[in-house]
Amino acid sequence: MIINKKIMKKYFTIRLFAFALLFCTQQTHAQDGEQLFKAKCNACHIVDKNSTGPLLKGVLKKWSDAGEAELLYEWVKNPANLIAGGKSQMANAIKDYSASAMTAQVATNAEVDAILTYVDTYTAAIVPAATVVGAEGNLPEKKIVPNYKENLTLFYWLSFTIILLLIAIVILSTTITTFIKSDFFKKKLAEKSQSDSTTLIAVLIAFGTLFLSSPSYALTFMQPGQAEKDMPWLLVESSDIYLMVTINFVLLGVVLYLRHMFKDFLEMVKKPKAIQVVAAKSTTRKISKILTDVVPIEEEHTILMHHEYDGIQELDNNLPPWWVWGFYATIVFAVVYLFNYHVLKTADLQIKEYDKEIAQSKIDVTAYLNKMAMNVDETNAIQLTDTKDLSAGKTLFETNCVLCHNPKGEGNIGPNLTDNHWIYGPDVKDLFKTIKYGAANGMPEHASKLNPIQLQQVASFVLSLPDTEGREPQGIAYDKEGKAVQ
């Protein structure tokens, strides 16, 4: 009977583990709101301000306050149908915000929730005002991206180890399942055999769900016009690497646990029942002694204190050893911390360390931009005429600009880029600045998407576009010399 209890505890642990794994799986594969926003909404919406589309922050609360929270999903998936049905006041109120109609999106309710959660919880990153001296002025600090080549290599190796661990789990699980269905276990544990098999299958299902559910949105595939020279085909962020390392450790733990379980089953076959019972008690007692230092119940009279309250007596148990040693560790840590940061000052406090990192970042950015010949900004940009540059500019234009300006630049939501009228100036420097920082009337910024060379290529391509009939002229007319026409 003691053996059965032991086995029941083991399989109860497995059931808890399988449940926890399934729960963690759902958390791991919860929709990545940031990546979904960039994939589905970024063309017309900016997270923290109005653009071609309105600001999305707080939109869920507005629709909920209007009693139309459920209709918000339909607005995202089929706005034209919702407007035509006339059942949504919010849809009718927002339909005329932009000259371009809201585009229907292929998205599940969970993905819509993930996007709105990301938007509502978004806080703009505080970027230090680091500058780099260029040929004629200053260039704002550029964000240093992870080493995607190294990350991709790690991604390959971690994927390989995950596959190996999964194979090991399948082999061990199949072996244990076959073993517990043997005649020996049918005789000894007839009433538990089905439960054991079900438990093992639950473990397999949990891990199957981990890798067969919806794909991760953290990985980013390069889109046309976005890739730079020698960039990998798949952008693996550092967070993806951390996730895969965690998965490897979890799978390794499962492999070791199944291996230990299999060895226990073999010991059950080899050892007589009485020996197993004694071994189980001995092991339990040792573990209890190490973790809790509790006196066995048959010896509790030795630590019974000589007072009583309403029939309640008190035992003078020692504090758990793990707690005592943890307390000692905090004392040692506090002393080391005090001498390290405040007495000897061998290490920098956070503010000083932060200042050093910022200074080093400025040096790194300067070196990177000089090395890549990207020390270009709105003060020294020039119009490029080389065929390769114009071809690259065309590809970038088709990827980022056609939604608002149409393929030939004749204008749609945005103005016509081919006539002689300009809102922010006709010079390549003016155009470079507008593309880089955006404008208040709905033009989004592209500094976060394109590097300085690419911004210069797009601006040069726009200036090379032939005159095309399209949207009515906007802004001020300029002659060929770039002077305003009175």
Image (tube, rainbow, N blue to C red):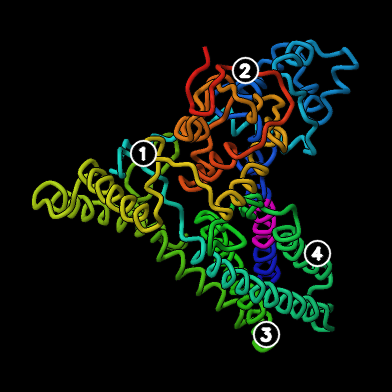
Q: Which residue is mark 2?
A: 474
What residue occupies the far left of the structure in this picture? 344
Q: Is residue 375 above or below residue 166?
A: above
Q: Are marks 3 and 2 in contact (CB under 8 Å)?
A: no
Front residue of this view, candidates 293 and 366: 366
Task: Residue type at mark 4: give it.
Answer: Thr
Q: In terms of sequence position, does the residue under pointer 1 or pointer 4 come before the other? A: 1
Q: In terms of sequence position, does the residue under pointer 3 or pointer 1 come before the other? A: 1
Instruction: Categorize mark 3 by other alpha carbons within 10 Å: few (<14), some (14-19), many (20+).
Output: few
Left or right, 417 with respect to 122, comes to right
Q: In terms of sequence position, does the residue under pointer 3 or pointer 2 come before the other? A: 3
Left or right, 280 with respect to 7, comes to left
Task: Residue type at mark 2: give it.
Answer: Gln
Q: Is residue 402 above or below residue 238?
A: above
Q: Is residue 201 above or below residue 263?
A: above
Q: CA distance from mark 3 to mark 1?
A: 67 Å
Q: Which mark is residue 140?
A: 1
Judging from the image, what secondary structure is the residue with disc 2 in?
A: loop
Asked whether residue 473 appears in the rendered view, the answer is yes
The tally of labels here is: 4
Q: Which residue is mark 3?
A: 266
- Image coordinates for residue 77, horizontal then vertical, percent: 81, 31
Select label 1 or label 2 by which is in front.
Answer: 2
